[in-house]
Each structure stands twice: as C-alpha cells, then as structure tokens.
Amino acid sequence: MTQPLPVLVQTPAHSQVAGTLSYLSELALPAGTLVRVPLGRRETLGIVWDAASQGQAEVETSRLRPIATALTALPPLSAAWRQLVDFAASYYQRAAGEIALAALPPQLRELSSEQLARRLKRTAAETAPSATEQAPTLTPEQQTVLAQIEAQAGPFLLFGATGSGKTEVYLRCVQALLERDPEAQAMVMVPEINLTPQLESRFAARFGAEVVVSLHSGMTNPQRLKSWLAAHSGAARIVLGTRMAVFASMPKLRLIVVDEEHDPSYKQQEGARYSARDLAIYRGRLEGAKVILGSATPSLESWHHSRPVAEGGRYVRLLMPSRVGDGGALPLVRRVDMNHQPKHAVFSPPLLEALKGRIAKSEQSMVFLNRRGYAPVLHCNDCEWKSECPHCSAFRVFHKLDRTLRCHHCGFTERVPRACPSCGSPDIRPMGRGTEKLEEHLAELLADVQRPDGQPVRIVRIDADTTKLKGELEAQLAQVHSGEVDVLVGTQMIAKGHDFRRITLVAAANPDSALFSSDFRAPERLFSLLMQAAGRAGRDAGISAQSEMWVQTQHPTHPLYENLKKHDYPGFAAQQLKEREQAGLPPYSFQALVRAEARTQETAQAFLNAASTFGTEAAASLNVTLYPAVPMSVQRVANVERAQMLIESPSRAALQRFLAGWHDTLHAVRQGPEGKGLIRWAVDVDPLTI
C-alpha cells in the first residue's frame, strides 16, 4: 500500500518551497532515509524527514509522484542530526533542505543502493585501530585540566597559552573516550584547510590512520564520499575537519573539539551563514557529547560565557597559562616607535639588526603583513590616477611577479600599463606595500648577509599567491620545518596554528590600520592575530628564552599594545567587554544583517527600506531596532551594488521571533514593486563583519 512521505530536497535560496515535499512510497521508510525523487523534469537527492518539523502543504494523494529510489543500504541519518539541521535552518533563516543536502557528499547523488552497500563493506574492512606513537608525559596543568573535563559536563573553554599543549589535551580526551567506549566517535575541528594535514598526522600517529578521516572543502568528491561513509557508518572513530565537519553524520558522537575557536573562519560567509562553533555547542547538547572550545585568545563571546556561574556564565573555563617544557617562556614583545625611525622605512634599523642576529645564530624569523600582492594601489604622480577596478568600488592590487593589476574582489586582471591610462605620463608608481614587496625589499637589505655556512640568506613567502597549486603549501611548510628557510614572509596564513620549532623572532610589519577601524570587532581580531603570531616564536623550550615578537607601530602606547607586551589577554578582554557593554554591542546585544544586491544602489536600499517599513510595528513590540539601509563598505563588486541593514535587540529570543515573522514580509516585498531589479537578498544572523 502506498503512503505519502515528507521529503526534504535542495531548493533555491529564498524559494517559496522552504519545507518538505510529499512523495508516495510503497515502503514504510523511516525518517532519515536517503531517497531519489523527481523534481520538475529532473531527479534529485532527498531525505525522508520528520512530518512535524517542517511545513508541508496538504496535497491530494492522486497528484503525488512516487519516490524513484530509496538508498536503503545506508543507515538513516539520526534524529539528532535532523534536529541539528532544523535548528540551523530556523536560527540562520535558511531552508532546511539547503542546509541538509549541502552537508552530504555530492557523489551520493550518483550511486545506487548496491554500489553504496559495496563501499560500506569496503570501509568497514579497512578500519581497525592501531596506535603507534608513545604519548608524552603530561604537565601538571594538563593533568589538572583533564581531571576537570573528566569530572564535569561542560561545555568547556580551554584558555591555554600558545605552546601550552592544548593539542595533547585533545588527544588524551579522545584516548580516554575510546578506552571507555571503543565504538564512540570524536570530532575535532580546525579553522582552515591548511591546518588539517598537521593535525591528521598527530592523530594518525597516536590512534592509527585507519580510524581517522578528514572532511573539508579541499577534498575531491570521491575523497569526501569515502570519509563521509566512514563517519556515517561508525567505522571512523575520529573526524577532523573545517567548519563543514560540524554537519558530519556521526551516529555515536561523544566528543567535539573546536580548536582556535575564536577564528572568524568558523563563520560561513556564503549561503547559509552559520557559525560552526555555535552549532558545535548546540550539537553537543543534542548528542550528549562533551564540547571543548580551545584558544590562546578566545572570542569575547566565549570569554563572556565562561565567567563564573554566579554571574551568568554557561561554560567552564579551564586554564593552561604555561608553555610545555622547562622554562618554556612566551616571547618578549618589543614595540618600535616608527615616529622615531627613518621616514618611509619598511624595516626599522633595530628590527633589521635583530633579523641579522638571528640569521647569524642559524635561527629562523617570521615577518607578516596582512596584505598580499606587491602594492595595494598603482598611481600616477602627474594626474593622481589610481588603479581602480572598473567593476568594483575598490582598487586593483599591483602584482609585480607577473606584472598584473588584479582585483581581489571580482578577479578582474589586466597587464600593468606602460603609461598612465588617463594622462599618458610614464611616471606611474606603486603606493603602499604587500607581502611581495616586503619579500623583495628584505632580499635587498639582506643581500650582503651570509649564513654561518657561507650560503646566502634564504627567504620564502607564503600567501594565497604562492600556494595556488596543489601541494605548494605543504612543500613550502616542509622547507620551513627542515630549517632550509631563514626568513619566512607572509600573511595571516602563517601566523596561526603552525608548530614552527625553529622560529625565534616574529615581526608585525605594519599592524596599525585595525586600531581605528569602524568595525567594532577589529581590535579583537588584531589582538588575536598578534598573540597567535607571537605564539609561533620560541615553541621549542630550548630556545624560547631568547624569542621575541617585534611590533612596528606609530602608536606604541596604545592600550592594545600594552596588553600585548604583557601577554595579558584577560586584561584586554576586560577592557573590550567594558567598552562593548557601555555601547550595547555583542555579547550584550544580538544582531542580524539583511544584505541586498541589485544593479543600482537605489534599488538595493529601496528593498531594505520597504521591508523595514513593513516590519516597524512588530519590531517596536519586541524591542528590536531597525537601522536605516546603508551601502556596504565595498559597495560595488562585479558591477553589482550592495547595501545592508542592521537589526539589533538586547534579547536573542526577541530577535529570533522578529526574524521568523518578518521572513514572509521579505518575500512579499521581493515580489512587489520595491523588489524589481533586486538580484538577491540574504539574512546574516550574528554577523562578524558589519
């Protein structure tokens, strides 16, 4: 006997089909079963869903189409996983089908139930734990923290200095879990793809490569399918990954670790703009899994949540302030007042001498600047022409290596002109500096310096331009680890997460721009980046005593640098939280952004202002503030104008109630005259950039 079943399918963002669709099935398929169903003229992957959780229109049975295929070889997706998807869709204002289907490997759309059964059988045969590496002796701080994790439910915020051995704590937590329950699963997340190989080698050495899989967007479709099947079937005990791993199907998940939890990369910036860190906390509650957030510079939200319970705290704060190893000291922070240095100097004389001193001792140094390319702008000295992008409200960056002007927003690239396109003058010059120019200038300054073995100084640059091809990043990092490099130059890619054992000096070439940014989170990001960068120096206890962090600044007495010199994150956090509380900013309020894109700025703003007008009454009743629509900081990208509107409330629940009720209004305005010419719109809940 056939019966109608609710099925979740991937629908376009903001389409009118936000819930499930009904299909006929001769089998009583449990919720969570993967199926193939007809949708229009094509066949698509779907998931049998819970009838009550998503809206479903009543349709006569005679008009329903049957399910084409049920992939019954795969165990159904768990109830907790489905609840996670429903929550994420509701909280982040997206369709559940969009989130659920995006979390599945693309190759599931191509394989039959029989093919999946064979792959599952192969996966099960390949996995058997085989620990190889001997665990190091724990420090007293690590022992204390592990005892606290064992004794309490969490969630935990592990506040540990760079080099304090947080990864070893994660390894021991996983080890204890698997000893207690050999079938349990653990998830360990890192913010960026380039950190997964390093972590995977650590976990594979300890537990055996057979039970460890990775999940991230840099994998091929077959690799992703293999890892997903291993996690879904329970064959993989440990899943390592970036933010997408938070949606991995793991039926026996009992531990979630979010390393470098402060990192903005955990927030998705396209499509469903979810925070993997926040969803990890929610998933831990659903699955009964312990959750550990780890960082040397926690996000101010997590720090605020880990205050004492009597003050409203929700996380347990764990402390590991000391570096591993006898006398493992944090680097000495030296501030160079650039007001007293030669004008236009890229490297102050004291820093240059310090770099030469490290080279003479066969030690490594790292110089970072968070701007790639040779120079951010090319300009004409005669007519003031600048290398603006014709498609964006931004400048094209000068890349000297291939003599191009490249827009880092839309990708538009042209050869560098021989003369000014505006007045014909040959006097066009680069303004400012990027990592490419930094590398070139440093090579000139160190041209006469030799290493102790008589060889010339070796400088390597690591940024998005030098690591485009597969394997390039790994090869360059291997050079650094093996000691072949004397000075490493790069962007924030090199400033966080990497365990460089030979680096004893780290220098921030020009970090001041974030001090006076209009973005209230800019100081938090800068302090975190500088602390993380400082953490790359002196990670080997034998050389940590003489390690240094140099900061070249026009504002050496700024409170941020005062706290950095003392490695005083709590002091910095207290000052920032006080300022935010006075200004009513997160975590003391809750925000959402609505972004609109159109061919003209007027159209984008008209849509937002119309939606605001229709929502004014509801907002006032819920104590929600709707701010006027404004252009985004980069208001035009690829000939598309962009505007945004901020929504704020002192209550998270009130903001959510308003957004849920306002969703239909946005759809209605989109269909009306104010929506004419609109390309797309999106809601960003808990935005990180405003």
Image (spheres, grey):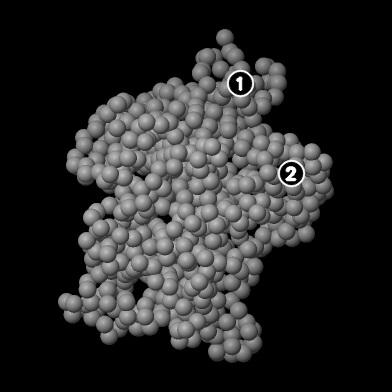
Crowd class of label 1 (few under 14; some 14 to 19; many from 20; radius 10 Å)? some
Q: Which x, y percent locates residue 167?
A: 33, 46
Residue at the limit of the structure toward the front, as seen here: 310
Quadrant location, the N terminus: top right
Residue nearer the viewer, 380 or 284? 284
Examine the image and state in which quarter residue 651 appears. top right
The residue carrying mark 2 is 624
The residue carrying mark 1 is 51
In the image, residue 360 sits, relative to residue 475, either above or below, namely below
SS state under label 1: loop
Identity of the residue drawn at 64% across and 87% down:
383
Look at the image and tell me whether residue 404 can be seen: no
Give the tally of numbered discs.
2
Quadrant location, the C terminus: bottom right
Query: Mark 1 or mark 2: which is in front?
Result: 2
Q: Which x, y percent locates residue 182?
A: 29, 26
Look at the image and tell me whether residue 604 can be seen: yes
Q: Which x, y percent locates residue 192?
A: 42, 51
Residue 383 got which mark?
A: none
Identity of the residue drawn at 72% across and 38% down:
658
Residue nearer the viewer, 277 or 600? 277
Mark 1 or mark 2, which has the lower sequence index?
A: 1
Crowd class of label 2 (few under 14; some 14 to 19; many from 20; radius 10 Å)? many
In the image, residue 409 sits, relative to residue 442, either above or below, namely above
Distance between the Cα atoms at labels 1 and 2? 32 Å
Q: Which x, y percent locates residue 481?
A: 26, 61
**173 lies left or right of 106:** left
- The type of residue carrying mark 1 is Ala
**42 lies left or right of 670:** left
- The type of residue carrying mark 2 is Val
**44 lies left or right of 487:** right
